[in-house]
Amino acid sequence: MKKESLTRRLALMSMAALGSVAALGLASAPAAAEDVVLKVYTAIEEEQMPPYKEAFEAANPGIKIEWQRDSTGVVTARLLAEKENRQADVVWGLAASSLMVLDQEGMLESYKPVGFDQIKDDFKDRRTGWPTWVGMDAWASAICFNTAEAEKLGLPKPTSWKDLLDPVYQGHIVMPNPGSSGTGFLSVAAWLQMFGETGGWQFMDGLHANMNTYTHSGSKPCKAAGAGEYPIGISFSYPGVKLINDGAPLEVILPTEGIGWEMEATAIMKGTDKLEAAQKLADFAASAEANKLYNQSYQVLARKDVTPELPENYPANEADLLLSPNNFEWAAGNRQAILDEWQKRYGAKSEPKS
Amino acid sequence: MAVDAGGAYLRIDHVSKSFGAFQALKDISLEINSGEFVCFLGPSGCGKTTLLRAIAGLDIQTTGRIFQGGRDISALPPAKRDFGIVFQSYALFPNLSVAENVAYGLVSTNRPKAEIDARVAELVALVGLGGQEPKYPSQLSGGQQQRVALARALAMSPGLLLLDEPLSALDARVRQHLRGELKDLQRKLKVTTIMVTHDQEEALAIADRIVVMNQGVIEQVGTPLEVYRHPKTAFVADFVGQMNFLPVERVAADRVRFGAIEFTTSGADPAARPGVQSMLCVRPEDIQIRNVAAGQGNTLKVKIDHMEFLGSFCRAELIVDGGRHLKADFSINAMRDLALQPGQDLTIALPVDRLRLFQAESHV
Amino acid sequence: MSDAALAPAGPLAADIRPSGNQPPRIRPQAGAEDWVMRGAIALLGVYFIITLVLPLYTLLIKSVEDKDKNFIGVANFARYFADPALTQSLINTFTVSIIGTVITIFLAFLYAYALTRTCMAMRGILRAVALVPLLAPSLLPGLALIYLFGNQGIFKGLLMGHEIYGPIGIIIGEVFFAFPHALIILVTALSVADQRLYEAADSLRASPTRVFMTVTLPGCRYGLISAAMVVFTLIFTDFGVPKVIGGSYNVLATDVYRQVIGQFNFQMGAVVGLLLLFPAVISFTVDRLVQRKQVALLSARAVPYRPSPRPKTDRFFLIVACLIAGFLLLILGMAFLGSIITFWPYKLVPTLKWYDFTRLGTDGWGPYFNSLRMAAMVALIGTAIVFTGAYLTEKSRGAKGLRSALHLIAMVPLAVPGIVLGLAYIFFFNAPGNPLGLIYNTMTILVVNTICHFYTVCHLTAVTALKQVDAEFEAVSASLKVPLFRTFWRVTVPVCLPAILDISVYLFVNAMTTVSAVIFLYASDTKLMSINAINTDDAGNTASACAMGMVIVVTSAVLKGLHSLLVRRLHKRTQAWRQR
């Protein structure tokens, strides 16, 4: 009888232990009742989230931000999947091209934030007087170049996109698959705009001959270059700068022909029941104060009246090389056709060369 | 334990059970009296366990009714019936001690603990396991485990005790011993008991009445002696005890012919017409070899093919003219007296009152 | 026996009515307990419908719709098969799945044979090491393989100029990932051998090779088939390994990801998801058929096989097993190394800074505690649901059709890739007007989803354990007028406790490592460590991703250790009755 009860007690004990941990999960701290809580979807880097939140909440007492962060693709997919039953109130910090997809689905509320006139033209939804999204800052394509590996392999440093067509680079270049990465797509869209439709595809045919592999994620080529996996990665500046600061023998090259770029933007979700608070956030996102915050990670800002300061090791001439005008509407409208063409040309034989 | 006017404690009334297209029980009717020990006997697949499970409510019959103590229990779930059950696997709770197993049903009756303890002690002593209370089933022998199962089944003083092949998993010696105890216990407690078994010897030894079943029907119901001595069907004759079968042709109401030899049979059957093929049955122990007079009827010349020594007696394989084999049991005395040897010629007699006759096609 | 004269007659055959019409059927009367059971079974049915059937239906219906929800039949499928790139990934998926399965089964068989049929040294340790991959999120082998065989890898030379990115990397990663699953099945299959067959073979002077071919292999062929099917399904549907190391070698699982995450094409995602489902369903059906045969083939009274020492053979298998175990540890060790090196490969100074997750942003160690909570809840609630559910399908009376239907549904999650299940959950639970939408964005949906995702293996474990429990316990307790739930709690649960603990540990460990199903479902305050590791890797911080993976491994290992301690104590305490 004794042994039996011991068995049971043992089992109960282990269940209780699991149970107490589980109970912790049920007891989460609720927000103060009187606060308006905005559900904000974002794709900004994690380290940027606390300062953004603190600054906004300090400026707007009574409104709290509840973040939902993920990579651009996941956030967009999720917003679309939730279309029938909207969860987000505001999107703050998502690729403008993604917001345009949402806009095509009629999911965005139009609102002209305070200080709209201070936003640069390229950073505005200029179709109507009532924009559905407003830009915040921009990131641009860049070549991450591993100097240590290049030296070992005897590779010259490329300075332009066309340099990359040199057979010497064969098998040493990686770039993101535009089908799965926004960064990949913005580069492709920029080449098509810069070199023209025919020239753009010709350029990519040549590039494809030198390409080692197409990655799923946009930052991966730069990351791989930083780790010496491949000497050259077509990506964007931010991860490269971070890697340099971490000690990677990396150089971030901005090709001389110009660079494709994409902006992070803000939008209010149509149907939000916290419209007033959402508009306050949209106002803040377009303010000079917020732009100064963006400047901690990005060099190109939406507002005319904020002079950007460069983060350490950030390439200095980024703003000058940005493709201008960058026709986002054209890119968004032709996205599927471009991807289909890309897939037809390079997708089928995307097996690695070994 | 109310008994209805008919006197039967358990009444099974035209019970049938089918599993899909297969009919496991075909229109079974049976009455069992209070305090009786009844065995369901038959080969595997004959429906005996199905009938027991129908009585317990574990697999309820398709049609027909069952009354226990005058109460119609036909459709009741097991928990609402009044029985204790012991399975071949014992189904003892392995994590509970002997005492806990026996007390299992008592505990949920909310009786005072002292009363439960006393009852458990009584039951454990009853099955002869005093002092084994703290042990777990796996620490007991098979026979002991079966006693625990029995004590547990009896704990709630059920009106009906159901035993599903309770002794089959035990070895021969323990089985014999336990079956004696089981019978004693049942007699002492006077609990109406049904035991399912495929072992005819066990059924003959233990039962007040035997229900012989085959292919979903009851072949015969009777005391062990009746069943053994007067099998109603060739199946019963064959299944219970040893039996010799001789194909014969009916020549008169009380006479049959086997080859050139004619035999007289008892109990003339008026329905039987001459010329009908029949089976003549005689048990090996009923074959007479001593004092066979020269002019006596029902005699047969045979040759001993071989003999099998079985302890207290000898079973001989006899060859009748025409190659037919017969089994005959001889006592050791007869063997010695007649100096029986394989190859020896012999005249045997088939006693008239021990012969049974069945329709030929009925025996397979 | 048709002769009426020979039927039992006299007083026993009471009143035979000469009736020509059919007697009435007996309708079994249900007791209160039967109703509780039926209610519980119905509840289980509803649970399955809500957590599995309806979400999957909601998603799969999208494969025959266009973006505006018009029914377009198989047009999406036609488009899929017209695209050479996508059909290429179908071929790719089969290629890596088949090669990966063959290698995994070969290695796992050698290892299982060494563990069960030889007297080699260190069997205990080697068995434990083999299960290590179960504790790691599937991202980890990918990262470790990059460190090992990438262009800067230590052993790059071993690849002889081939690239780790692509089929080679996927196959190595999947072998690591699937190995323990195959091993568990094969160890079980090889353990049930009958000593007498070997004695018979020996007495007939059969050569060892002949014995192996005629006794050993046929004896475990069902185990082999079953293991192969499980491994094939795992590799076919896995997303973590190809995502990290597949390069541009596309497989179906990454196609779903690309369709949904890159192009927001849910319809095409559903098409690919459905294709992912098909081979898994087929392999699952084969497995079921094989299992059914196996039950019939196992003889009741076999003498368990006990290996006798054969020094040469034992040594050979020790070397083989150590090599395989070494490979598994190498991958884990490399991931650990990656997490403590300042900057691979340029600054090889050890550091602990990658474990300081607060550096990365707001979350810090928060996701870790979320993971811990989620895993604990999954283990606790999941075990209760799975075991009770298995008990109901296995032991209750009546409603046979419904019960076998439930049993079948419980098999489905094994065939559903996590990413498909995750999307299905969004579409179902976040549909407007669904009252269950309440749980969207909460910890609850993660728990429900994870339980569903890992249901099958747990269900099978529970059913196996329950089948070993005497079938008549319920009948006995009914005859003793003891309520069924009391017998369930007092007898069935204690007897099955080892299996119950196994299930809860399995659920815990998998909940710690799961990514694919929950990546669409977590909210800001329910972010999980495994997802954080993926995001961290995506953000370029491979070392911290390794560190997070290692934290998960260590947590699961600690729990697994506690589990085996508990089991050992349990065995000691219950030794008195737990024999056989």
Image: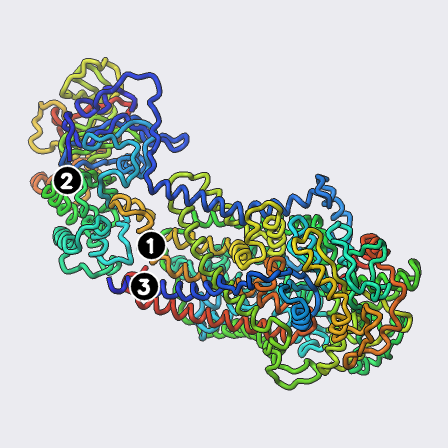
Viewer-proximal residue among C182 and C40: C40
In the image, what residue occupies the spot 34% across and 32% down? B24
Is residue A195 visible in the rendered image? The answer is yes
Q: Which chain is home to disc 2?
A: B
Tag 2: residue type?
Val
In the image, what residue occupies the spot 84% across and 76% down? A253
- Indicate left or right for A195 with C396 as reference: right
Pinpoint residue A213: horizontal percent, then vertical percent.
77, 66
In the image, what residue occupies the spot 35% across and 21% down? C22
- Asked where in the image residue A134 lies, by quadrant, the reply is bottom right
Tag 3: residue type?
Thr
In the picture, the quarter occupied by the C terminus of chain B is top left
Determine contact: label 2, label 1, CB under 8 Å: no
Is residue A171 visible in the rendered image? The answer is no
- Indicate left or right for B160 with A193 as reference: left
Which numbered disc covers residue B191?
2
| Vertical placement of residue C552 versus A84, above or below | below
Q: Which residue is mark 1?
A: C489
In the picture, the quarter occupied by the N terminus of chain B is top left
